[in-house]
């Protein structure tokens, strides 16, 4: 027997029974939020040309992609991201649409994580893209849609809000190459103070170096803006801070309290973010369940320059979390099992349909004898067996 015939590839898994019920529940709740905000569903191919994801701004390394070729030898990639294909689609299939367009998706993405370290290669995601508009109204729309989505399945959560231009503006003042900048960014993202200090200590002391050194600690409520204003005053990051403060004040009527956090150390891996960025965490899941932000320059890569923003929800992680909730029940056990004596099968099927229409969980037994039906009911924990005929 082939060694791999009964297993799945590393980083992937089967979803069974209650897991699928939980996934359907999560996706259904989120979809209702998306529809209520006016988004329309789209789907992109699982296979795209490699060029779609090889853009300098994609932030996706070629090592992170699963690749293959078509029958003409052209290089393909298994979809590692949904935003890039949707930008491609808008610039071609939807180029004559009235702007803005509101799109949502529900599809997996695939990332090659050689070490895995608890992460999957197949990620179940739902997300939205608001394309063709810039400004604070669009950003507030994206943020409130994200908050509504998370609120549909969790109450104990926090939204961390930052701005890509803060780090970009400060790092642009340094005489460093892109590789060195990326090492600094990774240190900030991981809040690795030791690595960050080592990198910054090699640079000529200046206001930008001092400000970047402080970014990981600029985390909290509205008081963060006062501290950041002192550190970033006179730099190009100041206008980004002022805009972020305006966003924060506009969200105040939602009454989020300490669920809304400012994090100036929020520097996303994807290089296409240009404005506000955010992540959402819920109690019980270590990684972010929502990531998103503004990416005004991405569509220009597809010859259709326009503003855009969006976010993605890790529905797989949320579904697994909900299965651990004792208050949630995703059991598929029927209440009533209906067995038909020979010649009375259609009567039994009619009874099952009638019970279902009354809101009961009923199931037609396909086993040939009453004894087998009752044994099956005992094993499944089905409380009632009805005999027809």
Image (cartoon, grey):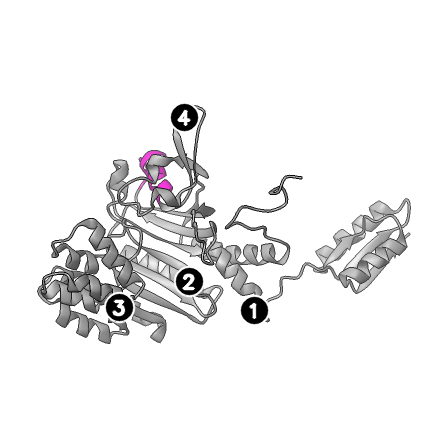
Tell me what residue is drawn at x 37 percent, y 40 percent: 85
Q: CA distance from mark 4 to mark 1?
A: 49 Å
- 362 to the left or right of 63: right
Sort mark 3 into few (<14), some (14-19) or many (20+) by Cα contacts within 10 Å: some
Above or below, comparing residue 197 to residue 341 in the picture: below
Q: What residue sits right under mark 2 in the picture?
A: 287
The residue mark sitting in front, 3 or 1, is 3
Residue 166 position in % (x across, y down): 20, 60
Q: Secondary structure at mark 3?
A: helix
Cα separation, mark 1 vs mark 2, equals: 18 Å
Numbered disc in front, either 4 or 2:
4
Report the residue at 62% width, 62% height from top: 330
What span is colored magenta in the figure?
84-98
Residue at the spot of label 4: 73
Of circles 1 and 2, which is in front? 2
The residue that disc 3 covers is 193
Q: Residues within 10 Å of mark 4 (few under 14, many from 20)?
A: few
């Amino acid at each position: 027997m082939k060694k791999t015939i009964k297993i799945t590839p590393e980083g992937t898994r089967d979803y069974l029974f209650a897991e699928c019920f939980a996934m359907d529940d999560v996706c259904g709740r989120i979809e209702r939020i998306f529809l209520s905000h006016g988004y329309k569903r789209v789907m992109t191919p699982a296979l795209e040309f490699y060029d779609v994801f090889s853009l300098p701004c994609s932030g996706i390394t070629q090592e992170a992609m699963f690749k293959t070729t078509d029958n003409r030898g052209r290089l393909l990639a298994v979809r590692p991201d949904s935003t890039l294909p949707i930008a491609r689609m808008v610039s071609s299939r939807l180029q004559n649409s009235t702007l803005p367009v509101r799109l949502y998706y529900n599809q997996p993405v695939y990332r090659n994580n050689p070490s895995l370290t608890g992460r999957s290669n197949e990620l179940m995601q739902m997300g939205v893209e608001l394309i063709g508009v810039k400004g604070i109204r669009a950003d507030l729309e994206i943020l409130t849609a994200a908050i509504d989505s998370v609120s549909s399945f969790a109450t104990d959560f926090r939204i961390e809000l930052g701005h890509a231009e803060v780090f970009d503006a400060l790092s642009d003042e340094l005489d460093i190459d892109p590789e060195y900048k990326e090492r600094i960014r990774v240190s900030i993202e991981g809040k690795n103070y030791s690595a960050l200090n080592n990198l910054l200590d090699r640079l000529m002391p200046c206001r930008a170096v001092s400000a970047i050194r402080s970014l990981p600690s600029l985390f909290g409520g509205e008081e963060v803006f006062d501290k950041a204003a002192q550190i970033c005053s006179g730099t190009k990051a100041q206008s980004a801070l002022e805009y972020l403060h305006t966003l924060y004040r506009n969200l105040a009527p939602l009454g989020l309290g300490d669920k809304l956090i400012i994090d100036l150390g929020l520097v996303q891996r994807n290089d296409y973010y240009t404005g506000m960025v955010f992540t959402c965490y819920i109690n019980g899941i270590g990684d972010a369940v929502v990531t998103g932000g503004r990416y005004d320059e991405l569509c220009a890569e597809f010859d259709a320059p326009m503003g855009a923003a969006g976010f993605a929800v890790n529905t797989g992680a949320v579904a697994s979390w909900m299965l651990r909730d004792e208050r949630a029940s995703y059991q598929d056990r029927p209440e009533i099992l209906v067995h038909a004596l020979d010649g009375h099968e259609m009567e039994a099927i009619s009874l099952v349909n009638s019970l279902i229409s009354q809101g009961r969980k009923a199931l037609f037994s396909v086993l040939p004898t009453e004894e087998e039906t009752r044994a099956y009911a005992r094993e499944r924990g089905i409380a009632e067996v009805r005999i027809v005929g």
